[in-house]
Image (cartoon, rainbow, N blue to C red):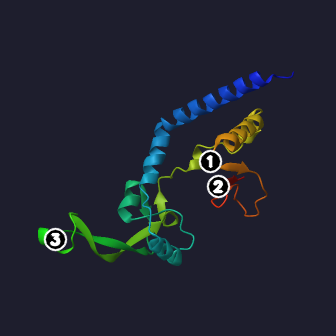
């Protein structure tokens, strides 16, 4: 049965509305809130520390300190060697030091020391949630996904500041990437 353009537009709008409702419901679940809290526990490391981590543990994926792993319900396995990173030494400035350094900041970094972190592979304990716990891998099996996908891509390409295109990707496991030079999402 052929559908009119108006019926197709109405269906697309309904599907977009349902997707929004489902994402909103997901964001309100306890499990998803736990996932967000868990990910907030992982520090964003400087380029220097990322290099230090990679040199000492090339396969590291999630890195945290001893206390942070303990808060996440995981424990460092006996015999594991720490990954050393640099950590700032923060000092409260006296009024004289604030004048000397021409700052109004109450605290300042006065140096660095080495600290210890561990990768998730060096720990045991409570399982960590991942984004894949919330994404259905076989979403493409749904009967209307292809049409909805094309509607979303068309809307982005027509109204968005970025463009979406499809191209073969030779990198194993990579399903898409962003190309800043052309403001293009390639999938």
Q: How many marks?
A: 3
Most extreme residue toward the right is 1
Instruction: Determine the secondary structure under disc 1.
Output: loop
User: Which label number is shown at residue 99?
Assistant: 3
Picture coordinates of residue 59 (x, y %)?
57, 70
Q: Nearer the N terminus, badge 2 or badge 1? A: 1
Q: Nearer the N terminus, badge 1 or badge 3? A: 3
* Alpha carbon separation for disc pair 3 and 2: 46 Å
Residue found 72% across the figure and 26% down from its top: 9
Task: Classify 10 Å Cα crowding around label 2: few (below 14), some (14-19), many (20 and above).
Answer: few
Tags 3 and 2 touching, CB below 8 Å: no
Instruction: Determine the secondary structure under disc 2.
Output: loop
- Location of residue 152 (image quadrant): top right
Tags 1 and 3 touching, CB below 8 Å: no
Residue found 69% across the figure and 49% down from its top: 163
Residue tagged 2: 183
* Residue 109 located left or right of residue 68: left
- Location of residue 159 (image quadrant): top right
Task: Classify 10 Å Cα crowding around label 3: few (below 14), some (14-19), many (20 and above).
Answer: few
Residue tagged 1: 161
Residue found 65% across the figure and 61% down from its top: 181
Instruction: Determine the secondary structure under disc 3.
Output: helix
Asked whether residue 77 is in view, the answer is no
Q: Nearer the N terminus, badge 3 or badge 2? A: 3
- In this rendering, the answer to whether 121 lies above or below 154 is below
Residue found 70% across the figure and 23% down from its top: 10
* Residue 179 located left or right of residue 168: left
Along the viewing direction, whichever of 10 and 46 lies nearer the viewer: 10
Asked whether residue 176 is in view, the answer is yes
Task: Classify 10 Å Cα crowding around label 1: few (below 14), some (14-19), many (20 and above).
Answer: few
């Amino acid at each position: 049965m052929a559908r009119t353009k108006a019926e197709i537009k109405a269906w697309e709008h309904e599907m977009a509305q349902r997707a929004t409702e489902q994402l909103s419901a997901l964001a309100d679940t306890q499990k998803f809130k736990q996932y967000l809290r868990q990910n907030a526990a992982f520090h964003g490391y400087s380029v220097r520390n990322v290099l230090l981590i990679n040199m000492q543990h090339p396969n590291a994926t999630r890195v945290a300190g001893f206390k942070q792993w303990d808060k996440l319900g995981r424990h460092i396995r006996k015999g594991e060697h720490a990954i050393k990173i640099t950590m700032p030494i923060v000092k409260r400035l006296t009024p004289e030091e604030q004048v000397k350094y021409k700052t109004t900041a109450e605290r300042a970094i006065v140096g660095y020391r080495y600290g210890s972190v561990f990768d998730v592979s060096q720990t045991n304990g409570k399982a960590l949630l991942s984004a894949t716990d919330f994404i259905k891998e076989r979403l493409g099996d749904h009967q209307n996904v292809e049409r909805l996908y094309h509607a979303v891509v068309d809307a982005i390409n027509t109204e968005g500041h970025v463009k979406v295109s499809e191209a073969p990707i030779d990198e194993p496991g990579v399903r898409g990437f962003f190309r800043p030079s052309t403001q293009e999402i390639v999938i």
